[in-house]
Image (cartoon, helix red, strand yellow):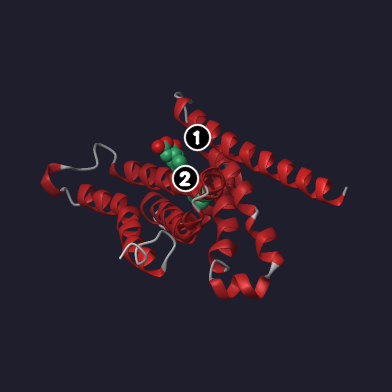
Amino acid sequence: MSRLIKPGSTSFYRLTKPVVFLICLFPLAYLLARAFDVAGLGLGANPIEELLHELGRWGLKLLLLTLCVTPVRRWTGWNWLIGYRRMLGLFAFFYIVLHFIVYAVLDQGLDMTAIIEDVLKRPYITLGMAGLLMLVPLAVTSTKGMMRRLGRRWQKLHRLVYVIAIVAVWHFYWQVKLDTLEPAVYAFVLAVLLGSRLVFFAKSRQRTRLKKS
Ligand code: HEM
């Protein structure tokens, strides 16, 4: 029995992946409940803005959570965490696509001229758009088959996620009018995550140098 549920085993993932999947869907379910005013929840005075903001925040949270997987795995030795990385990344993409759909359909009424003008004229929208476009190749190549096919190039391509995270936090920071505390917290978390990558990188280079000498 204990062998069956060993972290990282097929049975372990079979049990836990649906749970992680449902947890990732929960913010959307809650937003839908608010949008349909279930149990008097509601979206407040400005429902479109609330939807836009909540979806953007969840997209960013999941993006940062995806970036947490590797450092936490290395610090704790919990290698099985890698099994959830793809799902978390794809959910981040999903929420960001919904964020864009709410912007394009509900906020801009699918007025393509207005959307293009916005993307070209408002720097924080330009950044958001760049983030979304850069996420597309990562989502498309996230499958095991693509990983195998691309080999080392897959890792290189997926390093783009660091640029995307910087762009996303910047997009958040730029659109905030007064209270910059929240985007500053996201920026801090991102700085810690990127810093930890640099530490791992420096350590692995040192190890390689020691092996050679
Ligand atoms: C990597 C992609 C993106 C991420 C992570 C992201 C995330 C966010 C976050 C966290 C916010 C702030 C929410 C808040 O204040 O509570 C936001 C706001 C916003 N985003 Fe994005 N976003 C992305 C892409 C886009 C794209 C592609 C567009 C449209 C082309 C867009 C349009 C907006 C708009 C219009 C706002 C609200 C601005 C306001 O209320 O003044 N975002 N986004």
Q: Position of residue 87 (x, y in %)?
A: 44, 60
User: Secondary structure beneath disc 2?
Assistant: helix
Mark 1 sits near ligand 1, with its Cβ under 8 Å away? yes
In three-dimensional space, the C-alpha distance between marks 2 and 1, rounded to whole angstroms, equals 9 Å
Residue 60, numbered circle: 2
Question: Is residue 134 visible from the viewing direction of this image?
Answer: yes
Pointers 2 and 1 in contact (CB under 8 A)? yes
Q: Is residue 53 left or right of residue 180?
A: left
Mark 2 sits near ligand 1, with its Cβ under 8 Å away? yes
Residue 62 vertical placement versus 6 (above, below)? above
Question: Is residue 117 visible from the viewing direction of this image?
Answer: no
- 203 or 161, which lies in front? 203
| Quadrant in which residue 41 is drawn | top left
Q: In percent of the image, x 64 and y 36: which residue is there?
A: 195
Q: Is residue 130 left or right of residue 12?
A: right
- 121 or 204, which lies in front? 204
Q: Is residue 20 left or right of residue 154?
A: left
User: Secondary structure beneath disc 1?
Assistant: helix
Q: Residues within 10 Å of mark 1 (few under 14, many from 20)?
A: many
Q: In percent of the image, x 14 and y 49: which residue is there?
A: 38
Q: Of the residues shown, which amino acid type is indicated by label 2? A: Leu
Which residue of the protein is positioned furthest toward the right in this rendering? 213
Q: Position of residue 200 (x, y in %)?
A: 67, 43
Q: Residues within 10 Å of mark 2 (few under 14, many from 20)?
A: many
Q: Of the residues shown, which amino acid type is indicated by label 1? A: Tyr
Disc 1 designates what residue?
Answer: 186
Q: Is residue 141 left or right of residue 207?
A: left
Q: Position of residue 155 (x, y in %)?
A: 66, 60
Q: Position of residue 77 (x, y in %)?
A: 52, 49
Q: In percent of the image, x 86 and y 51: which residue is there?
A: 212
Work out which quarter of the rendered image holds the N terminus and state it: bottom left
Residue 35 vertical placement versus 152 (above, below)? above
